[in-house]
Amino acid sequence: REGCWHQPPVLHSDNGAPMTSYTLKARLTELGMLMSYSRPRVSNDNPYSEALFRTVKYCPAWPTKGFASLNAVRDWMLAFEQAYNEQHLHSGIRYVTPADRHQGVDRERLEHRKAVYESAKRRHPQRWSGNTRNWEIPGSVSLNPGKLHEIERNKQAA
């Protein structure tokens, strides 16, 4: 439905007991999913999750006095998630939103920005000491891509 390029989808997690349990592994196998684990003693193995946590932590809208109820937490997180995906410009994908990238409109936005920057440089070359910002579309992003390719090779060999 989401057009994921990983077929089957992959669940990335830490190496905690719940995530390595036989029950979860069996259920994921039933669902046709693969597991990907953080490297031992590496706390920042999932840069996407880490970026999300940092954005939440430093969000100016975070209630400094806490939440009044569980429903207040849920409402806040739903609003945050919408803003994070639909409004927040992510540096790792050249300052477009995840929704832009997911819907394929990032190409148009980045081409427009590139044209604006190049036009500004032609009109005012004295303001530029080098090249303009890189507005090329970043390639595919993945966690543990070597591991996923190894899994795919093993599946094809079987």
Image: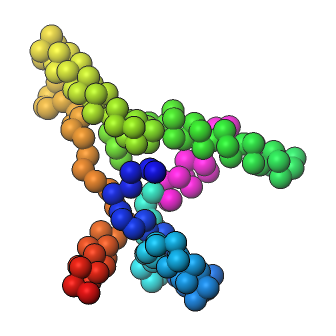
- Residue 125 visible here: yes
Is residue 115 toward the left or the right of residue 147 in the image?
A: left
Give the residue drawn at x 75%, y 42%: 75
Q: Which stretch did the figure color magenta? A: 49-63
Q: How many marks?
A: 0
- Which of the 4 image quarters holds residue 158? bottom left
- Based on the displayed image, in which of its 4 quarters is residue 127 positioned? top left
Q: Position of residue 108 (x, y in %)?
A: 28, 28
Say if the magenta span includes residue 61: yes
> Which of the pair 125/93 is nearer the observer?
93
Q: Is residue 73 above or below residue 114?
A: below
Residue 25 on image: x %, y %? 54, 83
Residue at x 40%, y 42% (from the top left corner): 102
Above or below for 39 versus 119: below
Residue placed at 77% from the left, 49% from the top? 73
Instruction: Tell me if residue 127 can be seen.
Output: no
- Name the side, left or right, on which 12 lies relative to 73: left
Identify the residue shown where x is 14% and y is 32%.
131
Residue 48 drawn above or below residue 154:
above
